[in-house]
Image (cartoon, rainbow, N blue to C red):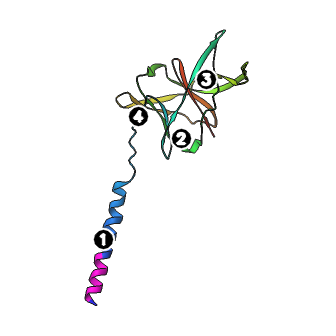
């Protein structure tokens, strides 16, 4: 009888140690992108955005939509920029539809800049957070000749 009680106490002690140590090995929230580019940090993961080319025709600067990824607005935490980019010209813009291209793709111009806050967190690694609230819609992060676009649902 005494050995059964002592075995139960040992078993309960081992289970408590395991339950306490599990949070110590929880998923690490460090940001470690492998390739240069722009990423979006969501509640679940760090996802890479594909760049889009900026066109300039008759002093109208626009992009042609290439099926940008969709993210839920509630999942967006911030953007991550990794690489050697000139962040002094980084802007976050809503995209406005101007009409179809000759190939039938939608053309979008850059709307008014959203206020953003950039913070250096490592070598060539920056976080970008909008200062205000973003609504649902089509957005783009624009640096020089590249734009990374996405839909927020």
Q: Residue 6 placed where, x, y %?
A: 26, 82
Q: Secondary structure at mark 3?
A: loop
Tag 3 or tag 2, which sits nearer the N-term?
A: 2
Q: Residue at x 67, y 25 (%)?
A: 96
Q: Is residue 69 left or right of residue 85?
A: right
Give the residue pinned by disc 4.
34
Neighbor class of circle 3 (other Cα within 10 Å; few <14, some 14-19, many 20+) is: few
Q: Which residue is mark 2?
A: 76
**First to last magenta residue range:** 2-10
Tell me the crowding category of disc 2: few under 14, some 14 to 19, or many 20 or more residues within 10 angstroms, Cα based. Answer: some
Q: Nearer the viewer, residue 104 or 54?
A: 104
Residue 136 in magenta? no
Furthest residue in direction front, as rendered = 103
Query: For the residue labelled by badge 1, is the local secondary structure a helix, a strand or a loop?
Result: helix
- Left/right placement of residue 147 relative to residue 19 reads right
Q: Classify 10 Å Cα crowding around label 4: few (below 14), some (14-19), many (20 and above).
A: few
Q: Which residue is mark 3?
A: 112
Quadrant of the rendering where the N terminus is positioned:
bottom left
Per the image, the residue denoted by label 1 is 14
> What whole-number distance in Å separates the C-alpha atoms at marks 4 and 2?
20 Å
């Amino acid at each position: 009888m005494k050995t059964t009680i002592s075995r139960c106490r040992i078993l309960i002690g081992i289970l408590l140690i395991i339950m306490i140590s599990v949070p110590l090995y929880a998923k690490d929230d460090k940001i470690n992108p492998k390739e240069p580019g722009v990423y979006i940090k969501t509640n679940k993961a760090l996802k890479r955005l594909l760049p889009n080319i900026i066109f300039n025709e008759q002093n109208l600067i626009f992009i042609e939509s290439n099926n940008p990824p969709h993210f839920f607005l509630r999942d967006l935490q911030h953007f991550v920029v990794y690489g050697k980019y000139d962040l002094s010209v980084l802007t976050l813009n809503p995209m406005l539809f101007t009409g179809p291209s000759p190939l039938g793709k939608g053309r979008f111009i850059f709307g008014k800049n959203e206020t953003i806050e950039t913070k250096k967190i490592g070598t060539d690694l920056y976080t970008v957070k909008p200062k205000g609230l973003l609504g649902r819609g089509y957005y783009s992060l624009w640096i020089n000749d590249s734009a990374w676009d996405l839909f927020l649902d």
